[in-house]
Image: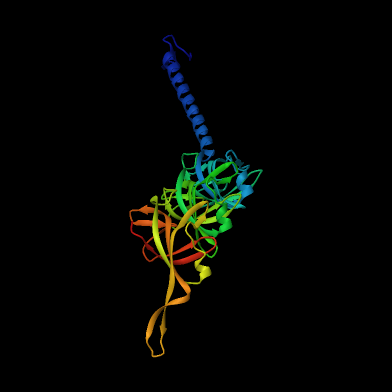
Amino acid sequence: MEIIDENGNLFGAVNVVDALAVCLLVAVVVAGVAAVGTLGAEDETEADDGPAVETRYATIDLGTQSSSLAETISAGDEMTRDDHPHSLTITDVYATPVSSGAADVTVRTEVEGTQFENGTYAFGDAEFATGRNVSIGTEAYDATGTIEAVENEGTELPVAETDALLETTASSEAAADVQVGDEVRIGDETVATVETVSVYPVGDGTHRVLVGATLTTLEHEYDRRYGQIPVESGSTIPLSTADYDLDLAVLDTGVTDEPGEPTTTTVEIDLEKLGDREAGQFEPGLTETAGGETWATIEDIEREPASVIVETENGELHERHHPTKDDVTLTVELQTRETALGPRFKGSSLDNGDTVYLDFGIASIEERLWVVDD
């Protein structure tokens, strides 16, 4: 039997052209299956690579560190993991001294870690999430902190300038150290500047110190903080310079001056039954001075014999002049601040009958005062 007959049929049954067409179709199908198989193999290879490495930005509170270590931490510091394609780079640093040898440190970091389908983000073998602890190790230092936030963007910390009026009590020597222009520094960064200072004697060798300062603060969700301390009434802010370490209570925010406008208030102070030597210490022009400012000046003095009650032999009571004691009335001009609620003196309200302490150097008094009508 001939393979191809006179009519062009293969084995006398199938036309040769049709047979070639069928073979070509089969070849295309086989090639397609092979291609699909190859692509499927590539897809399986990609799936075997696991979850992708993604970038996140984290705020980390490193807590209180030594001042020397705090000054070492800087933007650009990097930590890598040999066992994972992960890295952590510091992009911003915020530090505030809490004493002459320590500082609170917060850093912003750029993190290359793994994002899993279940929502977990990992750095190395550990979950990297808010509230977790993380160690940052470089060639220069090792520090451990707490993750405060993990976000998809943002390399800088949200810092701002915040004015605050602060107060403390200190010895005369310590009070004298506080000066306008003093700066609190960490490394080359200034984080607080003293704008105003008022020093008031309050007795027993101590002074009330009111300080207006501009603080570099870190913005949190509901407040601003100096280091980790909210800048709000009732908080205590540490100011540490080369000359002093002071803890000051926050009186007010948004201002560096005491409330009110500077003015003067004249008062009278009665001193009873002073000996001649005691009474003779007071004279017009005597002043109370502290912090380079004069807060009180004696304008006038009235002196008269003190009165005493004596009983006669028959039991009668009579008022007589004391033979050696005098009553003294001081008229004193006080440097005050006038507010909508009345005058203030030495940072406190001033009312009739208040007890005031005045230190005139050669003599000090703590007596009730009476405001003189203008």
Residue 353 or 53: which is nearer the viewer?
353
Residue 319 in view of the camera: yes
Q: Nearer the viewer, residue 329 or 14?
A: 329
How many tags in the picture?
Answer: 0
Instruction: Tell me: residue 107, above or below residue 289.
Output: above
Q: Position of residue 55 (x, y in %)?
A: 51, 39
Q: Which percent across, then down, holds residue 258?
A: 42, 51
Query: What is the quadrant of residue 25 in the picture?
Result: top left
- Up/down of 43 relative to 171, above or below: above
The answer to which of 27 and 180 lies nearer the viewer is: 180
Question: Residue shown at 45%/11% (left/top)?
Answer: 5
Q: Which residue is situated farthest in the right direction here?
A: 139
The residue lying at 47 percent from left, 66 percent from top is 366
Q: Residue furthest bottom?
A: 314
Position of residue 203 measured from the top left corner of the image (x, y, whole percent):
51, 64
Q: How is the image coloured?
A: rainbow
Vertical relation: 91 (above or below) 223: above
**Which residue is at the far top?**
6
Q: Is residue 117 visible?
A: no
Report the side of 283 relative to 74 (left or right).
Answer: left
Q: Tell me where residue 27 appears, x and y as whole percent.
A: 48, 22
Quadrant containing the C terminus is bottom left
The residue nearer to you, when weighing 201 against 279, is 279
Query: Viewed as shown, does residue 54 lie left or right of 254?
Result: right
